Amino acid sequence: MDRTAPPPVARVTRPQRERLNGHRGGVVYMTGLSGAGKSTLACLVERQLHALGLRTCVIDGDDLRCGLCSDLGFSDADRIENMRRATEVAHLMVNAGLLVVSAMISPFREERRAARSRFQPGDFLEVFVDAPLPVCEARDPKGLYARVRRGEIPGFTGVDSRYEAPQRPDLHIDTTRCTASQAAALLLDTMRLHGYFHLETAH
């Protein structure tokens, strides 16, 4: 009886996936207060990347809270775990050769540094989507700040839970100084400059 173990089956590699996709993988890691414009920017950028024939995925904090992270609350420890899980999902997708746009508050600098460390050099682009708290509160697209002021949501980032703004982000977008379309164009140009994709390889 032949007891020789069969040779291991080689897994499909990231470079093979990227060749199939026609572009490399990478993550755009947006951080900023609720209402700063992260989700709007993520959707605009994804639509434009998709129109270029690039394979993408958006990781939105609200979506994670409805599924993968539905067991987490809003203590500092739970926020840290939320960021860790989002980072691991992004890491898997980047290894699959996708361009990932993560739109989360991501309030803590140390955890953002930890997120960057999970990726190869050049795979991680930290983008600070910036708007001051009064502007975010005036926008209040989800009605969250109104609920905070009524005492319905304790521990809300920027109000009674800290937000640590990036000190040296790869890109700083002040959404009080540009339209959403202008912000998307700036981010796409930055992604090209960082080698995330090239127009001649888009299909």
Image: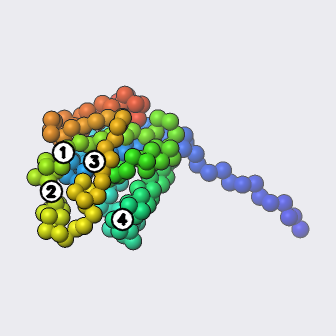
| First in sequence: mark 1 vs mark 4 | 4
Q: Horizontal and vertical percent for residue 60?
A: 32, 56
For the residue carrying disc 3, how many other residues have a C-alpha within 10 Å: few (<14), some (14-19), or many (20+)?
Answer: many
Q: Is residue 160 left or right of residue 146?
A: right
| First in sequence: mark 1 vs mark 2 | 1
Question: What distance separates the C-alpha of mark 4 from that of mark 3?
Answer: 18 Å
Q: Nearer the viewer, mark 1 or mark 3?
A: 1
Which residue matches tag 2? 141
For the residue carrying disc 4, how many other residues have a C-alpha within 10 Å: few (<14), some (14-19), or many (20+)?
Answer: few
Which residue matches tag 4? 75
Residue under the point 32% across and 68% down = 66
Q: Is residue 170 left or right of residue 120?
A: left
Q: Horizontal and vertical percent for residue 168?
A: 36, 35
Q: Nearer the viewer, mark 4 or mark 3?
A: 4
Task: Kindly tell me whether residue 94 is visible in this rendering.
Answer: no
Question: What distance separates the C-alpha of mark 2 from that of mark 3?
Answer: 14 Å
